Image: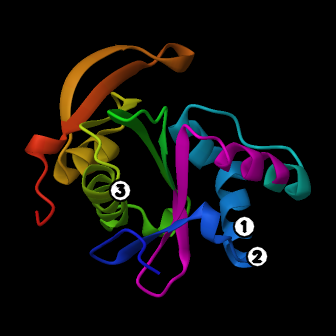
Amino acid sequence: MDWPRFGRVTLKPFSAGLTEEEWKGLYETFRDPEVAEWNGSSPLRSPFWLFKRFVQAETRRKDRLAFVILDEKGEYLGTLELYDLTPEEATLGILIGRKERWGQGYGTEAVRAALGYAFSTLGLKRVKLRTFAHNLRARRAFEKAGFREVGSGPGPRGREDVHMEVRREDFSPEA
């Protein structure tokens, strides 16, 4: 198991298969109204079996890599994706679904693990993302992981988005 790691977290690829507990955690993440709100979406309403089938189909796409985020005990924390993947760049998406773990640095560590993997293993030159301007906790976490703000603009539901990126030459795997 040579999965991406940083600090207390491990990124387990969906391609390695998920345990039933990991599937349940993922399902609960997407059903949670508060998590959905921070993700700019609506809470999932579809049944578990349909959700599982949809996720499995999505993770087979060639333009995305999906991971579950595991804590130091190997327990589910959330999900992370590198999507719109090209040989040069990808877009990062992350959800920490265990709200009682918010604000404890797990998201930053998961992003650091993903960036290390993106730059060293995949050979990408840039990873970008969008987040809500009002989500200061997420913005600070992304900055700690190495991202910098590169612009802003209107996002979904009329909210202001902040565009951030990190380039391989600016990333330090040890930081």
User: Which sits in the foreground, 9 or 157?
Assistant: 9
Q: Amino acid at mark 2?
A: Glu
| Contact (Cβ within 8 Å) of mark 2 with mark 1 | yes
Q: Is residue 164 left or right of residue 95?
A: left
Question: Where is residue 165 drawn, in percent x and y?
Answer: 25, 33
Question: Where is residue 113 drawn, in percent x and y?
Answer: 32, 62
Q: CA distance from mark 2 to mark 1?
A: 5 Å
| Residue 46 on the magenta span | no
Q: Amino acid at mark 1?
A: Trp
Question: Where is residue 132 drawn, in percent x and y?
Answer: 39, 30
Please report the bounds of the magenta region as a residue range. Answer: 53-79
Q: CA distance from mark 3 to mark 1?
A: 20 Å
Q: Earlier in the sequence, mark 3 or mark 2?
A: 2
Which residue is at 33% across, 27% downward? 133
Q: Closer to the observer: label 3 or label 2? A: 3
**Callout 1: helix, strand or loop?**
helix
Q: Is residue 112 left or right of residue 12?
A: left
Q: Which residue is mark 2?
A: 20
Q: Closer to the observer: label 3 or label 1? A: 3
| Contact (Cβ within 8 Å) of mark 3 with mark 1 | no
Give the answer, above or below, for where 21 lies relative to 44: below
Q: Which residue is mark 1?
A: 23
Give the answer, above or below, for where 6 lies relative to 134: below
Disc 3: CA contacts within 10 A as few (<14), some (14-19) or many (>=20): many
Which residue is at 54% across, 37% downward? 63
Disc 2: CA contacts within 10 A as few (<14), some (14-19) or many (>=20): few
